[in-house]
Amino acid sequence: MQDKIKTYLQEVRQRVDLAIEQVLENDNPLIEGLYKSAAYSTGGGKRVRAVFTFLVGNIFNVPGEQLLTPASAIELIHAASLIMDDLPYMDDSQLRRGKPSNHVVFGQDVALCASIALISEAIRMVLEEKDISDDKRIKMAAILTQSFGFDGLAAGQYVDLKLKRKNVEFGIIEYINHKKTAALFSASGQIGAILGQANARQIQAISDFSSNIGFAFQIMDDILDVAGDVKVVGKDLEHDKMNFVKLVGMEKAREYLFDYQKRALEALSVFGAQADEIKAFAEYLIHRVR
Ligand code: GRG
């Protein structure tokens, strides 16, 4: 099953990479630099959020053509957040996806403009997708916008940046991980569920899976931050502001990782064998090396 999921990841990655390349085609020489900066940071990701949208959509037999645009939009938002996260007044990271961070190459001013343009493009492409009904497009746009604002990335990043290092409560860590990382996973899953016209019970199951696996994904990110190989991980290590491993130790962090994975898998029980691919995906996420 792991080989199958890795092949599927590769397949979706290729489709999403192509869709993003097409959406970032530009014919205005005046803003060529802006597009170059945006394109620079949209390439090279694992595309796990897009794949999750596809996997949820597959449970409900949603055609791939309907999933491609929203899945690509999620990846644009994710790329925008990485550009911002690397800025000197945020995480101050020089390396991302194995190459110099966006602001190192294009400057902070351009990096910020590219990031904003990518978020804008993500919402535009979902709202203008012709093959999806108005109702679903509006719901998806609402989910996407919620994922990066006061209830998502920006909120998580704010608390992470302003967190006092000492006496960190677990509730605060939970908040940061849920908003900074799980929020985009949740949006990815919910979009697949909306396109599949899932019922309330199924939406709840996807939401529970997403928040738990998103949390586990962040713990794994923190583990790689401490114990990964910079050449493989492709970003500055020992750099993240709040690190779960530094806080609870490696052994306990691994316990939490498997505990969140278990909770995520339990949430999928309503789907029976239809969720086997998502289960394999969860396994991949927590055993990844980058
Ligand atoms: C976008 C409006 C807006 C706000 C951004 C900067 C910020 C606010 C939030 C930071 C969010 C952030 C970077 C969280 C880290 C999540 C994470 C674990 C990223 C790594 O994801 P991977 O491993 O990366 O999927 P690739 O490179 O494979 O895509």
Image (cartoon, rainbow, N blue to C red):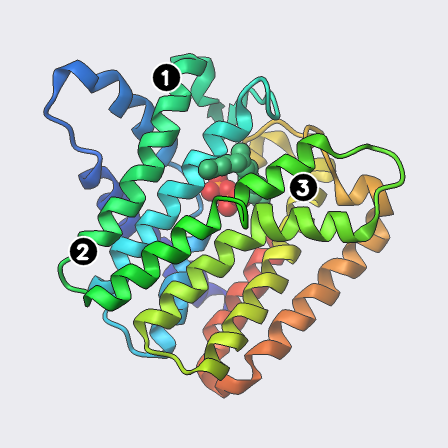
Question: Which amino acid type is shown beneath numbered disc 1?
Answer: Val
Measure the alpha-carbon separation of dots 3 and 1. 29 Å
Q: Is residue 140 left or right of residue 163?
A: left
Q: Amino acid at mark 2?
A: Glu
Q: Is residue 97 visible?
A: no
Question: In what element is the residue under mark 1?
Answer: helix
Residue 18, horizontal then vertical, whole percent:
23, 44
Q: Is residue 27 left or right of residue 177?
A: left
SS under mark 3: helix
**Residue 6 in the image: above or below residue 169:** below
Q: CA distance from mark 2 to mark 3?
A: 37 Å
Which residue is rendered at x = 33% and y = 78% of the image? 197
Q: Is residue 249 left or right of residue 195?
A: right
Identify the mark at residue 224; answer none if there is no mark.
Answer: 3
Disc 3 Cβ-to-ligand 1 distance below 8 Å: no
Give the farthest residue toward the right: 167
What percent of the width, then of the height, locates residue 153? 54, 43
Residue indicated by mark 1: 110
Q: Residue at x 52, y 76 (%)?
A: 204
Name which residue lies at 50% across and 83% down.
201
Confirm whether residue 109 shows in the render: yes
Select label 2 or label 3 by which is in front.
2
Q: Which mark is residue 129?
A: 2
Q: Quadrant of residue 80?
A: top left
